[in-house]
Amino acid sequence: MSTEAATAATPARFAGSWSELFRGGTGLLVVGLLLMEFATAMQYFAVAVVMPLVAHDLHAERSYGWLLGSYGMAMIAAAPLTPAITARLGRLRTAGVASVVFVVGGVLAAVAGSAVLFVVARLFQGFGSGVLTTFGVSAVAHSIPERLRKRVYSLISAMWLLPAFLGPVYASTVSDLLGWRWTLTLILPLVVVGRALVVRRAGAMRQEAAQGVEGVEKDSAVRTPPFIRVLILIGGCLLLLGGTSVKSGVGQIVAVCGLLVVAVAARKLLPSGERGPRLAVLAMLTLSLGYSGLDAMATVIARSGFGSSIAAASAVLTCDAVAWSTVAFLQPKFHERWNLSTGAAGVVGALLVAVPVAGMPVMLAAHLSSGTAMPLMWVAFLISGSGMGFIYTNLPVTAVDVRDKSTTDAFAAGLVLAESMGASLGSMIGGGLYAYGLQRGLSAWHSLSVAVGALSVSLFATVFIAVAIQRHLRLRG
């Protein structure tokens, strides 16, 4: 029975129970995944706070884009390569090696004495994170019953709630007392503990599938795209990042060429096959591009567009994370109370994300004062964050709900690739359009309007894809 049909017929069965989720080996897997997600969220906020200090100490203010973009590019490379790595090394070794790579990257970043070494370290971390994230999505699909998956993804999203408050405080306090280098290293033990719990459960996963995991892994390896396509994708990202860093017309041409290369390579790398999972992966790409790009530009919009204080600008990201985590955690209750199907929740979420963003360019063009604009911006991000709580947890469920179980790993890798690629492209495109507008003599307000308008196009594209997913699930049911 499909996810859609199961939800419509028996919501309670689809939701499962919390006691069942944390029972036995499944509970160990869930706790491990939550610890790793908590560490990821803490690192996200910590890096956002200390990155200006890093750039200053390493004399890399003009290489800011590289300091930020290296992590995402490595995740883009890791996701499509994970099935092949898993097929060669096995699940246990893959998770172990990825954890070592992640921790080594974190240590190297903390001791980096130059911008080049820091970028290389972040590449290591991003690659390890990409493999671990793909492994986690695949582990949920392989070893957790369908009726419990939505609760898992809800909990994973909810793990960003505490870091939204604790992360900036932790980063600023530790950096003041011990320095930014300690800020990046004190979080690493959480990853090690989480990985140990996930790997312990992964050892049992090999004996759970009737057809055997090794068969799945071999089939996934056959379906893995050639390595050259990954190199082409990374090359396109480098062109895009390099082009947006050059303040000239030639740089913009290079950036556009890079974007075209990325589009062609992504088309070859993203999984093909069943319509529903394929649409879910595409929706994750457009959603991450628009929303992550908007997130990356949020403080710039607040400060340069509306002239707000740093505290008011930071509150935007807090509103976003709190709304997202809270709604994601409560989503199983919404499904039970409103008999809400997976497809319908996706459409509602996509609309809630996209509609508030449509008013941002108008607010910027109107030159609203900080006292008027910031409350509106907080509300807009609260609504958009709530929408993310609805749609984000539904896309992984749909993406791995495949009839041919041998393609599960391929779609899990495609989902992580789509999210990491969208997040990286969103920040590059948003920042690039803003810089391009300033170069052409536009004001900060109008430059930001163009950037936000472009990102909103991607979010409205997600709405149409969500509607297509709903129709597909209804027909399949």
Image (cartoon, rainbow, N blue to C red):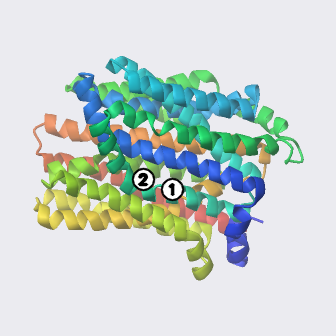
In this view, 96 is above or below 418: above
Instruction: Report the residue that reaches farthest toward the right.
Output: 210
Q: Is residue 168 visible?
A: yes
Q: Nearer the viewer, residue 322 or 176?
A: 176
Q: Is residue 256 visible?
A: no
Quarter of the image for the N terminus: give it. Answer: bottom right
Residue 12 is left or right of residue 394, and the answer is right
Q: Nearer the viewer, residue 456 or 17?
A: 17
User: Residue at label 1?
Assistant: 159
* CA gap, disc 1 and disc 2: 7 Å
Q: Residues within 10 Å of mark 2 (few under 14, many from 20)?
A: many
Residue 39 is left or right of residue 475, and the answer is left
Residue type, label 2: Pro
Point 50% across, 36% down: residue: 188
Give the number of the disc on residue 163: 2
Quarter of the image for the C terminus: give it. Answer: bottom right
In this view, 293 is above or below 376: above
In this view, 155 is above or below 253: below
State if disc 2 and disc 1 touch (CB < 8 Å): yes
Instruction: Report the residue that reaches farthest toward the bottom.
Output: 337
Instruction: Measuring from the top left, give residue 380's x and y in whole percent.
Output: 30, 65
Instruction: Measuring from the top left, give residue 414's x and y in whole percent.
Output: 60, 41
Instruction: Measuring from the top left, give residue 257's x and y in whole percent.
Output: 37, 28
